[in-house]
Amino acid sequence: MLITIFAYLMVIVFMVMIMKKWMSPLSALVVVPTIFTIAAMILGIANKGTLGKWVLAGIDTTSQTGIMLLFAILYFSIMLDAGLFDPITKKMIHFAKGDPMKILMATAIVSAAVSMNGDGTTTTLIVVSAFLPIYQKLGMKLMNLAVLLILQNTIMNLLPWGGPTARAMAVFHVGANILTYLLPGMIISLLYVIFIVARGMGKKERARLGVTQMTDLEIDALVKDDDPEKAKMKRPKLFAFNGIMTLALIALLVIDSFVDLGLPPLLLFLLGTVIALLVNYPNLKEQSARIGANGGDAVQVVILVFAAGVFMGLFQGSGMATGLAKSLTTIIPQSWSGYWGLIITALSAPGTFFLSNDGWYFGVIPVLREAGLQYGFTDMQMALASLMGQAFHLLSPLVAFIYLLLRLTKLDMGEWQKATAKYAVVVFAIFVITVLALGHMPIHVAQ
């Protein structure tokens, strides 16, 4: 019982520290769970084990993601230095003609398309690299870019090869046909983000900045980079090579989601980074300069990923995660059993926010599933219910790649969470209403 109280207190303290800006994410991810775990060990309520063992186990779960992030950031940073995204930026500004609304809607569309690869890190790097120069040159709010990107990635992450749906399929023993049930809500949500959220943001940006009617010559002047150092790094003659290599890399990432090619993202980005350096900057001094210039951003993100591993390792190893999971089933009255699908739906929002997908699907869900089967709910119904809260999952400080997004856009986590949450609530409602309206999940099962 006491370990469960510790679990809730730790989560609350952690979130308060982040939201109130009393601690940086790095400090909170390490200090808060360490203090609570040591206290639990002193009181004798923690599982048997050591801090070191639990921390290493947690870091082990995030190590591949961290290393992959390192090379992914380096790869796309090198592509940005080489000027791969310059023509894209130029064409988009020509298309928008200084209209913020067109740029925002384009951001939403491209974010959805790129998110089909199922990887948030890749999506962030590609979309931000392509659109950041446009936003900066026109003075647009970077908050809008970060909000639209995460909303679209949240929706597309429900594809069968995405992380949460793949876990739900494994736990509930359902097939890829779950996409059939999710697709209506996904389509409506995507249209909502493009035509309502992005359009609404566009109206506000139009009112603030106006629509600048620019000639082609003026647009060319706008996108022209006068920095001689940056000009030296550009490789316009290698645009075709860099573009084909990047598209091939993304294609392999997507294909590997369907068929195991034996080419994990870590290996693909490692090879891509090495090839990009050898082709674009064959001189050893230039290679060292590019790694040195871009390595700082990569390392800061990777450190946060490992810190998230420390948090989860201590949370799960100490027994706090298990205590929290069991408490969720014991506090629900027996008289509510007929509404178990809605209960799982309601729990999925805080569950996927405060826990990793692994913690939610492999820690909490098995307990909820056993109870639901006894109450007459099917695996597919509960699988759908468990995925509804994914609308909020990518707002969690435990999601590794959001630190990359915040780093690139230089946004504060608390402010970004608040700005995104109001739209995430609508996405959550769309999914719940769609699943219920189409009869894929019953509101009540007679007991």
Image (cartoon, rainbow, N blue to C red):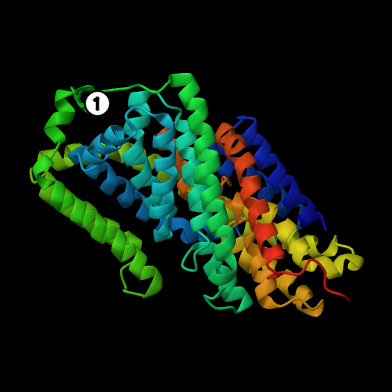
The tally of labels here is: 1
* Relative vertical location of residue 242 with respect to residue 16 in this rendering, above or below: below
Rendered residue at 32%/73% (across/down): 262
Q: In this view, does 75 lie to the left or right of 156?
A: left
Query: Type of residue at label 1?
Result: Ile
* Relative vertical location of residue 9 with respect to residue 208 in this rendering, above or below: below
Q: Position of residue 131 (x, y in %)?
A: 35, 37
Name the one closer to the observer, 79 or 400: 79
Name the one closer to the observer, 392 or 284: 392
State whether residue 353 appears in this view.
Answer: yes
Q: Position of residue 436 (x, y in %)?
A: 71, 64
Helix, strand or loop under label 1: helix
Badge 1 is on which residue? 219
* Relative vertical location of residue 361 with respect to residue 206 in this rendering, above or below: below
State whether residue 48 appears in this view.
Answer: no
Q: Quarter-wise, where is residue 87 in the image?
A: top left
Crowdedness of circle 1 by 10 Å Cα count: few (<14), some, many (20+)? some
Q: Position of residue 7 (x, y in %)?
A: 73, 52
Q: Position of residue 331 (x, y in %)?
A: 85, 60
